[in-house]
Image: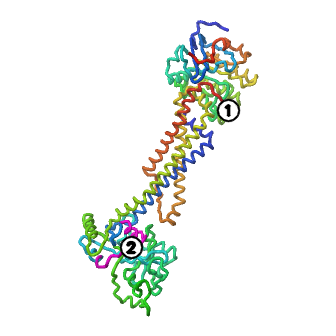
Amino acid sequence: MIDAPHFGSAIHLSNVRFSWPKSTFGLSVRDWSVHSGETVLLLGASGSGKSTLLSLICGINAPQSGNISINGTDIGALTGTRRDRFRADTIGIVFQLFNLLPYANGLDNILLPLKFSTQRRANFTDPKAEALRLAQSLGIGPDILRDGPASNLSVGQQQRVAVARALIGSPPILVADEPTSALDSVAQGEFLDLMFDQVRRTETTLVMVSHDERLADRFDRVEQLAEIIETSAMAAP
Amino acid sequence: MLIRLAFLSLKSRALTVGLTVFAIALSVALLLGVEKVRTGAKASFSDTISDTDLIVGARSGSVQLLLYSVFRIGSATNSVSWESFGEIANSPGVTWAVPLSLGDSHRQFRVLGTTSEYFDRYKYRSGRSLEFADGRSFDDLFDAVVGSDVAAELGYSVGDPIVVAHGIASFTEHEDTPFRISGILAKTGTPVDRTVIVSLEAIEAIHVDWQSGAQRPGTPTSPDQLRAMDLEPTAITAAMLGVDSRLQLFTLQRAINDYDKEPLLAIVPGLALQELWDTVGIAETALVGVSAMVVVTALLGMAAMLLSGLSARRREMAILRAVGARPTTIMGFLIIEALLMASAAAALGVGLLYLLLVVLQPILDANYGLFVPITGLDRGEILTLIAVVLAAGGVSLIPAVRAYRMSLSDGMIVKL
């Protein structure tokens, strides 16, 4: 666990309150931050508000009150459209399962974020070559990417393609929601090795949610979700 | 890229999408087909007679006069006296006059008595003249010219004998006056194809030995005796007139309608055709309306198909949102899918239409005398296709707005 105050803050939440519309589930975060380039593991069971927290960090939902600052930008102050563009530019996301558009091939899936972020696309002249390179470094050969729709890939392959998609164009932040829970322990280790290689090399900030404490020693910092967020089953004020 | 993704997404649901597209394509083919048949029907209808300025008959309704004189449907309630015809034919401004005498039949075909000038004056399809496929006009008193359908259906060729019956659908045939076929007309697509044409004198000749519908007792008059007789008719059914100028046309029409020696009616064929079409046309318009409704139904089916697929596609939308797609992009994605389907359906529909036209054209022509020309798509049809595609975009707003709402409320949590 590295306490490094000289790092810039990549993610900072203060006094955040959020509740889902037409729902009694609410969540609040008093003060929590992740430094730039830091890798953080959030431990928590499902139902602990982790998806809601990630939705807020990614700017898919906006809090009713409080401040969420990503790379120095208060995303709560952005309009929905600008928030979506900001997310496309800044954050790569990997889900637990079903990360890929099943009908498109792996290559199309990796290139998908570039459609929505001119900033990430501007990083290279040949996006396809970059996608193939990135996939290769994650252990996915070009044949697998081009050979038929993503639904034909194994779960392990799908998760690696998802990481390639999240990382293409080097967004400063990678958010991963239980990306290994569908993999067996060998595949888990291999997957994390490859992902960490990339993350360390590009100095990407990583926030990963999991319920598996065994993963902890790979991360700079480990936190219990329950200590960060307060959930309430009552309507938010 | 979004279009490519939409295409891939549709491809992955090939069966449902294929059926939906086929339904729209069928409805489009139906709509365009009805329109083509309608245009074809109207064209062949108004092409039935041209270059005739006035048709004169005994006073009745203008549509009725048109029906019996041109379409050989129904019969005249009264006749026009030969004196009146002569007087009208010699009126100032009248350049030509062709008498028409109807009332006899041969098998199921009507017999028309007229002069040989008929073959020069009767025009159809904007000025086309009648042509002989074989033989020539009548020379002798007992010469008959038959239309192409008559020849084809009864297997006649030039020189064959033909018996003309008195009255329509009568069994008492004029066996004692044997006619001979002198010519067969080329196909016109008009009622002329189904007509036996003889001279006016011949019509008189076959009635010489008949009185009040029954044969006069005694030896029938021989053909040679008939040829020597003066067979000037006393009355005709109707007449076709040509006049000098449009100006005189209406003066002459009024004069004939006000004729004091007998009640007559003169009609301008083009106007009467229009009047008749307006009556028939209501049914045609209804048909177009019904086929337009079929298109709307097919499009609503597509909207329902997209809508019912939405909940299975929540994951897909969450992925798109995660990589930075706006909710409006998700909306656009669904609209693009609808537009792609409708465009494919429009293209397929046009293909089906031409396939149907190629198959059905000879059948329609042979059985109903309806000639539907196979032409390219006209401006109206292209506009119709564009309208169908735009309407598809319109109805796709229903699932698109729903997808928009879903992608806003789902966030990153997707219940599977």
Name the outermost residue toward the left.
Answer: B92
Is residue B237 shown in magenta?
A: no
Q: Quadrant of residue B72?
A: bottom left
What type is the residue that disc 2 sits on? Ala
Q: Are marks 1 and 2 in contact (CB under 8 Å)?
A: no
Q: Is residue B44 above or below residue A1?
A: below
Q: Which mark is residue B76?
A: 2
Q: Is residue A137 above or below residue B156?
A: above
The quadrant the N terminus of chain B occupies is: top right
SS category of the residue bearing label 1: helix
The number of callouts visible is 2
Where is residue B177? Give x, y as percent.
Answer: 44, 86
Q: Which mark is residue A159?
A: none
Residue at coordinates 47% horizontally, 51% vertically from top-left? B289
Q: Viewer-proximal residue, B44 or A21?
A: A21
Where is residue B161? Give x, y as percent.
Answer: 48, 83
What type is the residue that disc 1 sits on? Ile
Residue at coordinates 35% horizontally, 76% vertically from top-left? B79
Name the outermost residue toward the bottom.
Answer: B219
Q: Chain of mark 2?
A: B
Where is residue B3? Give x, y as percent.
Answer: 54, 36
Is residue B78 shown in magenta?
A: yes
Please state which of the two labelled residues, at mark 1 or mark 2, is closer to the viewer: 2
- Residue B41 left/right relative to B6: left
Q: Quadrant of residue B76?
A: bottom left
Q: What residue range appears in magenta?
A: B62-84
